[in-house]
Amino acid sequence: MKNMKNMKNMKNMIKIKGQGPILITGPHGVYTIRNNIEIHDKEQYINKIINKLYKLLGPKRCTVMTWNKEFFEKNRIYPEDPNHIKYLKKSIWNKEMKRLKIKHPVLHIDLHGMTDNWFDHSNHLCIGTDGIKENYKCLYKQLLPKLTRIFDTLNVPYSFNNPYNGYSHNNDFYTLSHQGILNNFISLQFEISNSLRKKIAKEATTLNKFKNILIDLYSLNREILKTKKYKTCKKQQKTRKHKNSKISKKNKTYKKKTL
């Protein structure tokens, strides 16, 4: 079985398509491992949604990043969960985001799935905005009501930062939306219930509503980033580093197990 040391010489672990300023990531399209022991299940419909959004938005407006599912299934290994990284400099997703040749400003949407039983209703979207709130404090109050107006158009119950905020305030680990913020993106984490994911993946009307939300968010992103308030806020922004940010010697991979 191949370990990560050997995998360093292998290409195509991550699939990247497009060169547009709306960056969509989906880190849980395959089984991943976190904390060296915990297996995180792959999330249904996420890759399908990302591919459909890419077709609708096109490569000039959209860039997508996912694991190369075929690579990991063929080699029967788990990669480290890129949404739960302890050593930022060893995050291959972070390295790829740094290499992206996208003209700023970049709107980064990190897509995830959650189970329906988190809530009493079947359709739900949780938007994690704490990365923006923490790093662009002077903008957040101005931004929040505009975000609310955009998400109201989806016509499903949603919440901000409850139960997921997309950010580790103690810097115990780095989420992908946190990594996006550190790359000067405006990053949001979307946690989508299974029933809503199914609708987005299978119903053209819901998919188009979701696509329009991304377009509206990008327009808002451009509008905000042109303001004097953003420039002032940017000067105040402090890059937060993990207290144990030394480079780990190895990334971990694991043999696939039957769940």
Image (cartoon, helix red, strand yellow):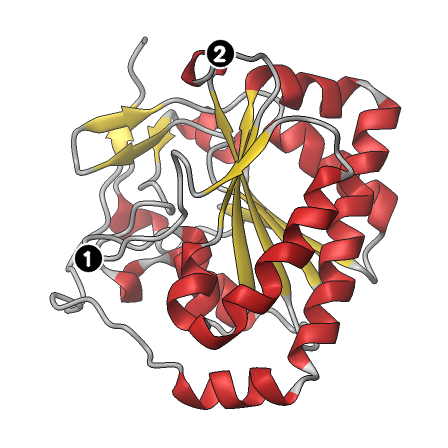
The local secondary structure at tag 2 comes to loop
Estimate how packed mark 1 is, as few (under 14), some (14 to 19) or many (20 or more) residues with alpha carbons within 10 Å: few
Q: Residue furthest left?
A: 244
Horizontal placement of 252 versus 133: left or right?
left
Q: Where is residue 172 in the image (x, y as percent from the top left)?
A: 18, 53
In the picture, which quadrant includes the N terminus?
top left
In 3D space, how far apart are the residues under numbered discs 1 and 2 (Cα atoms)? 30 Å
Question: Residue at label 1?
Answer: 170
Give above or below for 232 relative to 220: below
Given residues 221 and 10, the one toward you in this image is 221
Question: Which amino acid is tagged 2?
Answer: Asp
Horizontal placement of 182 versus 68: left or right?
left
Given residues 111 and 97, the one toward you in this image is 111
Identify the residue at horizontal 75%, vertical 34% (top origin): 154
Estimate how packed mark 2 is, as few (under 14), some (14 to 19) or many (20 or more) residues with alpha carbons within 10 Å: few
Q: In which quarter of the image is residue 21?
A: bottom right
Identify the residue at horizontal 35%, vertical 39% (top origin): 79
Question: Residue at label 2?
Answer: 120
Give above or below for 206 relative to 59: above
Residue 20 visible in rendering: no
Horizontal placement of 213 versus 69: left or right?
right
Given residues 245 and 243, the one toward you in this image is 243
Question: Which amino acid is tagged 1?
Answer: Asn
Given residues 28 and 141, the one toward you in this image is 141
The local secondary structure at tag 1 comes to loop
Q: Where is residue 163 in the image (x, y as percent from the top left)?
A: 38, 34
Identify the residue at horizontal 85%, vertical 52% (top origin): 58
Horizontal placement of 211 versus 5: left or right?
right
Give above or below for 194 relative to 127: above
Residue 248 visible in rendering: yes
